[in-house]
Image (tube, grey):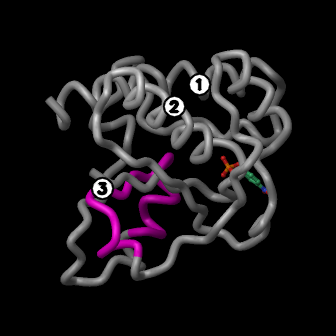
């Protein structure tokens, strides 16, 4: 099963989601491959934000080798699930998605989150607590995703 997480810059939320889902899938011995991209081109080629990397490392997730990429139309044929991190990015992805896309498209927390938020809040202009909150939301929803879709 191939999963693509999409945020705006692909340097904070979606690379974190990629790392969390890959970690949990490996721990549960599940055949899931997570990847991530952004709707914007600003950060193409850059490693994840140092604050995201530091927060992820505290939870045994190493994001240092990832490089930001921008989502393309072909991604809607390459992955089984495309998940937006927030409603703005979901709208962008709906506009990009071809009619005969094979990937499903959804708002990740709306379908799998249970902590009361549907958008993963953008932590870019916030402090460390916002980056930790992103990981809390992602661990919760990724766990449920694996339970529901990969049993
Ligand atoms: P992300 O966070 O979408 O979670 O990667 C952001 C990264 C960069 C910017 C905004 C959000 N930016 O404005 O450059």
Residue drawn at point x = 26 percent, y = 65 percent: 103
Residue hosting label 1 = 135
Label 1 vs label 2, nearer the camera: 2
Query: Is 134 one of the magenta-colored residues?
Result: no
Q: Is residue 27 left or right of residue 89?
A: left
In which quadrant is the C terminus drawn? top left
x and y, in percent, of residue 56 in the image: 68, 26
Q: Residues within 10 Å of mark 1 (few under 14, many from 20)?
A: many
Is 14 placed above or below 104 here?
Answer: above
Residue hosting label 3 = 81
Q: Which mark is residue 20?
A: 2
**Mark 1 vs 2, N-terminal side:** 2
**Mark 3 vs 1, N-terminal side:** 3
Query: Is 86 one of the magenta-colored residues?
Result: yes
Residue drawn at point x = 48 percent, y = 39 percent: 119
Residue 26 occupies which quadrant of the picture?
top left
Specify whether tag 2 is near ligand 1 (CB below 8 Å): no
Q: Determine whether the residue tagged by mark 2 lies in a helix, strand or loop.
A: helix
- The reply to whether dot 1 and dot 2 touch (C-beta < 8 Å) is yes
Q: Determine whether the residue tagged by mark 3 lies in a helix, strand or loop.
A: strand
Q: What stretch is highlighted in magenta?
A: 75-93
């Amino acid at each position: 099963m191939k999963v693509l997480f999409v945020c705006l810059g692909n340097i904070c939320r979606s690379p974190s989601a990629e790392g969390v889902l890959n970690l949990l899938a490996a721990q549960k011995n599940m055949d899931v491959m997570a990847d991530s991209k952004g709707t914007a081109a600003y950060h193409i080629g850059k490693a994840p934000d140092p604050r995201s990397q530091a927060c992820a490392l505290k939870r045994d997730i190493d994001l240092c080798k990832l490089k930001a990429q921008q989502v393309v139309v072909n991604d809607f044929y390459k992955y089984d699930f495309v998940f937006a991190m927030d409603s703005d990015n979901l709208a962008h992805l709906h506009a990009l998605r071809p009619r005969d896309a094979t990937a499903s498209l959804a708002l990740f927390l709306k379908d799998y989150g249970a902590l009361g938020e549907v958008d993963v809040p953008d932590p870019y202009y916030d402090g460390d607590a916002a980056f930790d909150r992103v990981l809390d939301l992602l661990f919760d929803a990724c766990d449920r995703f694996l339970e529901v879709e990969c049993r």
